[in-house]
Amino acid sequence: MIAYRPTNVFENMGPLEQDLYESAGPMLASFEAICHAIQTCPTRCFRDVPSELTKEFPALLFDYLKRFKAWKVPDEEKLTRRIRHALIALYQAENQLPPDEPEDSRLKVEFCTQIERLRGKLVQIAGADALRRFDDERLQGRAGDAAAKSRPQAAAAASSGGGSQSVLPGRMSNEQLAHELLLDPSFQLDEDGGCSAENPVYHRIRESFHQAFWDSLVDDLKLANPCYVRVLRVLGEIRDGLCDLLGKKETSAMNEVFDLGAIKEQTEQGRFVWSCVGTLVLSVVEVIKRVQTPKREEETAAKWAQVQATLEGAEVAEQPRAFCKGLEFLLERVNAMRIDAANARLRLISPVIKEHGIEYERGKFADKLNDGSLTLTMTKKWMCKVLK
């Protein structure tokens, strides 16, 4: 796999990965030559393999194993940290579920399944001792988790209607948007891209995963050989989000600021230093300030002042977290701009929905009846659940 399908093994092709990849080919070629010689030899015995085929193999194997260990140790450390953050988020999210959440609810089952899967991965990668240490640390912090859980629990349970499964939606579909506009022509998306009437359980669960991602990203940057793979993905998402919102002139300027190829090259060569971080974040902020809606100006300025102070005052040990704070701020501002653009489009289509919305919903209702996704039995169950 390493020699012939490296992209299936490596997250990125850094110096350690490149060294291992380059050593795998010659070692495998030597091994295959030895195997071929054994198969074609009349005695099919290793001692009859010509010495010129075997003399270099031990050195090649030793070099490969040495490079494999050099890559494997930091890679396992990186994966172990990521799994721990994911497990913490899953346990915290599970704790946010209402007390009356059914054991067989889709969300409960999904959490349990993912927890078991990641616990198995942790044992596989870091060993049983790593899992025991994780469990010990989690149990020691249980009092704090329980306190955080108990504060909003009663209100969450009261508003959840006996389960959180129905209040954990994704983005609103076109059909949902049309329905909301039909009921309220002035309807608009909230800051999260959904309806502001969502259950607080959903927000707390989402926050658990949100925080886990950024904490995990900080750990990637704190490694002895920092891993920028996911940082580059976040930068790509920020750039693509801005380019979707900008005109041609601003997009051209944005691509110059966000030359991901050059940034990737700098990270691989160890030239992406702290001054590069400050310059990059500041350049993007200036673009955001120019194209955001006027109502966002005060909000952006206040948040940027906090982030800027964090970036400028960060000691070396805190620079990874400060950088991630900057990325989080940029991504949050881009998402806010996307919501503003979506709400502007809703205002444009609202008159159309007012005139044709009922016809549209009747068509969607008929489609669901025809494909069997809506039945009388399901409707009765839904009505009984709502009326309880």
Image (tube, helix red, strand yellow):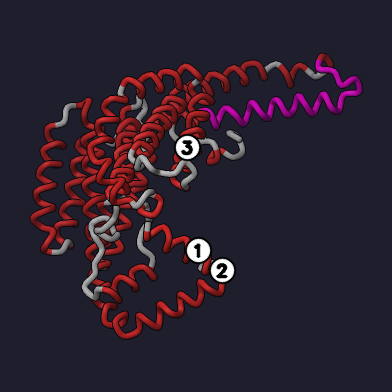
Q: Can you tell which quarter of the image residue 52 is in?
A: top right
Please state which amino acid type lies under the numbered disc 3: Cys
Q: Name the secondary structure under disc 3.
A: helix
Residue 380 pos. (x, y %): 47, 65
At a point 37% along the width and 46% down the height, the residue shown is 233
Q: Quadrant of the N terminus?
A: top right
> Mark 2 highlights which residue?
372
**Residue 253 in view of the camera:** no
Q: Which residues are magenta?
A: 20-46
Q: Nearer the viewer, residue 5 or 372?
A: 372
Q: Residue at x 43, y 27 (%)?
A: 80
Q: Which residue is mark 3?
A: 112
Q: Is residue 27 magenta?
A: yes
Residue 264, horizontal then vertical, whole percent: 36, 42
The mark closer to the camera, 3 or 1, is 1
Res 364 quadrant in image: bottom left
